[in-house]
Image: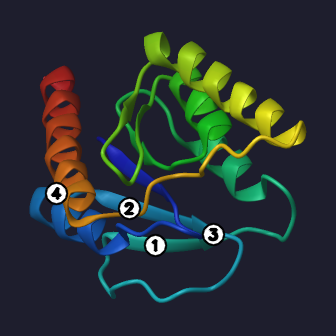
């Protein structure tokens, strides 16, 4: 059965995940380094991991696998989850795949290098209404794909 794992600390689409998961009856683990409010429902669970670098990421990687969906904008986490067979979607609706991760990680490294040598890379675009809409559409598509695979 498909589960959804949310890298929850800075995720702007937690409510959207809840709405979609409830419609499909899917369990969601919100994984965080600190306590936060999530809607009260038997389908939703808050997992608070110990403080420390990448502890939430490590927990998600240990528990997510084939057929599951991970919501995160963390690129190294996305690559690790894809390696375990999970589908990965960022809050702006970008679906990460094994084929796309090489380019995505290379661009991340290039941007980091440019910042190190003093060049401005501009940073990410602000989160917009159309990002939320794209996220909902792609999450629905990933759930349908996972359900079709289960059959």
The location of residue 89, given as percent across then percent down, is: 38, 41
The percent position of residue 15, horizontal first and vertical second, equals: 29, 75
Q: How is the image coloured?
A: rainbow
Give whichever of discs 4 and 2 has the lower sequence position: 2
Q: Which mark is residue 28?
A: 2
Does the residue at mark 2 contact the one at mark 1 (Cβ under 8 Å)? yes
Residue 21 pos. (x, y %): 22, 61
Mark 3 burial class by Cα count in 10 Å: few <14, some 14-19, many 20+: many
Q: Residue at x 27, y 55 (%)?
A: 131
Residue assigned mark 4: 133
Distance of mark 4 from mark 3, alpha carbons?
24 Å
Q: Name the side, left or right, on which 94 lies relative to 60.
A: left
| Residue named by callout 1 | 45
Q: Real-space Cα distance between discs 4 and 2?
A: 20 Å
**Do residues under tags 4 and 3 come within 8 Å of each other at their CB atoms?**
no
- Residue neighbourhood size for the residue with mark 4, other residues' Cα within 10 Å, grouped as few (<14), some (14–19), many (≥20): some
Count of numbered circles in the view: 4
Place residue 23 in its image quadrant.
bottom left
Residue 37 drawn above or below residue 108: below
Residue shown at 78% from the left, 33% from the top: 114
Circles 4 and 2 in contact, beta carbons < 8 Å: no
Q: Could you tell me which residue is drawn at 50 percent across and 50 percent down?
A: 72
Identify the residue under disc 3: 32
Q: Which part of the image, by quadrant, shows the C terminus?
A: top left
**Image position, residue 120 (x, y; %):** 71, 46
Sequence-first disc among 2 and 1? 2
């Amino acid at each position: 059965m498909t589960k959804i794992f949310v890298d929850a600390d800075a995720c702007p689409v937690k409510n959207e995940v809840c709405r979609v998961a409830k419609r499909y009856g899917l369990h969601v683990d919100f994984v965080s380094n600190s306590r936060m409010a999530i809607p009260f429902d038997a389908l939703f669970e808050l997992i608070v991991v110990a403080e420390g670098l990448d502890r939430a990421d490590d927990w998600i990687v240990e528990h997510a696998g084939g057929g599951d969906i991970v919501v995160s904008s963390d690129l190294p986490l996305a690559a690790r989850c894809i390696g375990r067979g999970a589908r990965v979607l960022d809050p702006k609706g970008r679906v990460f795949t094994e084929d796309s991760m090489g380019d995505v990680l290379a661009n991340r490294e290039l941007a980091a290098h440019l910042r190190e040598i003093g060049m401005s890379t501009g940073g990410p675009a602000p989160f917009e209404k159309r990002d939320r809409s794209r996220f909902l559409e792609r999450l629905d598509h990933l759930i349908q794909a996972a359900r079709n695979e289960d059959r």
